[in-house]
Image: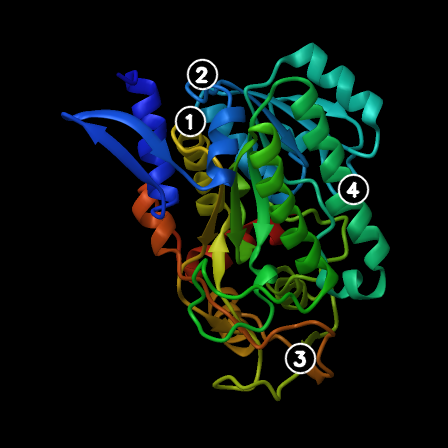
Amino acid sequence: MLDDQTISDLAKAFAAAPDGFLVVDSGHPTFAVLPYQVYQTLKKTKSNNKKIKKILVTGGAGYIGSHTVNLLLKEDFEVVVFDNLSTGRKEAVGDAKLVVGDLADKDALEKLFKKEKFDAIIHFAASIEVEESVANPAKYYQNNVANGLNLLDAMVANGVNRIVFSSSAAVYGEPEKNPIDEDSVCVPTNPYGETKLAFERILKWYGLAYGIHSISLRYFNAAGSMPEAGLGYDRSLKHTHLIPRVLDAALGKTAEINVFGKDYDTSDGTCVRDYIHVLDLADAHIRALAKLQKTPGANVYNVGTGLGSSVLEIIDATVEITGRMIPMKITDRRPGDPAKLVANSKKLQKEFGWKPRHDLKSIIESSWEWQKNT
């Protein structure tokens, strides 16, 4: 008779691959027929029951990474941040251990893994600007794919088999429907989205070959701040994301806000996006770690609110909250910008017990508090 662990593993396999079947004799399982890829995953999968305690966070000094690190520390995880500080701030990691280094440096990664003995990885480190990716795709394939492979190879070599990956709604491109669910066709319209999708696919094959368990979080437009913890957008960087640019215009730090295109097929002609508070996003990463302890294979989830706001709606809401006039100028579309991206995150809400706690007003208010005081 099969032991309880094997029966549990088979049950999970059949849930993922309903075309397999189990032969039972007098109430006892005797043998199973599974798709070959599922069999390979079970064969090469290491035990996934070890409690996750020590976390490596790549890119943990950056905007989303630092908010997640803050929450990890509050949840009593032991956190090590690996960041080259090209877009991150060393003061943003708080009490977490910071190792300054680059994922391109294989020797540095090997030394880090040998020394620290991680239980899981949260992988944020990446280049993230859509417009830049169109102008300089080489940078994006190097940073987001080649360097990511270095991280995965270090994991395999050192027996670390769990990773939460910071993916993006950019993998969908111009979607056929909104809200977008995880089964929607992925046809990225820019190299940034292509590189995120490429790494998701790599995770699938590394799972089948090497037993890497992964959760890819395809999130939409992260925004908001945590000013009480000294966390928010890095003021030393040139921002291309909408909300910090609008707030700069409100503060008079820029003369006007450029609205890239007013001829999209949306209610007011400007792009529509699903804005999610960075703290809700950080919470999803913590819940993903818990999910990884029980869920094998490569899994994908959308993270968003299900509500879309246009560029002009964001500007109007910012005027109302700040009490400032915001000069704007209509310019040409940016290359690679889809008209509308709104998430269907019901899968995440059901399986993680997660839901967004912050609305657009909270996002803009916290961002305004951060930017006017930094």
Residue 311 place in picture, x, y as percent: 56, 74
In this view, 67 is above or below 336: above
Crowding at dot 1, Cα within 10 Å, few <14 / some 14-19 / many 20+, comes out as: some
- For label 2, the SS is loop
Alpha carbon separation for disc pair 1 and 2: 7 Å
Residue 49's spot in the image, x, y percent? Answer: 41, 19
* Left or right: 183 as drawn, with respect to 81: left
Give the distance between the C-alpha atoms of the residues marked 3 and 4, in whole angstroms. Answer: 39 Å
Measured from the top left, where is residue 146 in percent x and y? 78, 42
Instruction: Say which mark, if any, is on residue 328.
Output: 3
Q: Say which residue appears at 33% left-offset and 42% top-offset.
A: 15
- Look at mark 2 in the image and give the residue it sits on: 50
Residue 372 visible to the viewer: yes
Q: Nearer the viewer, mark 3 or mark 2?
A: 2
The residue at the point 61 percent across, 54 percent down is 372
Q: Earlier in the sequence, mark 1 or mark 2?
A: 2
Residue at x-position 80% and y-position 28%: 101
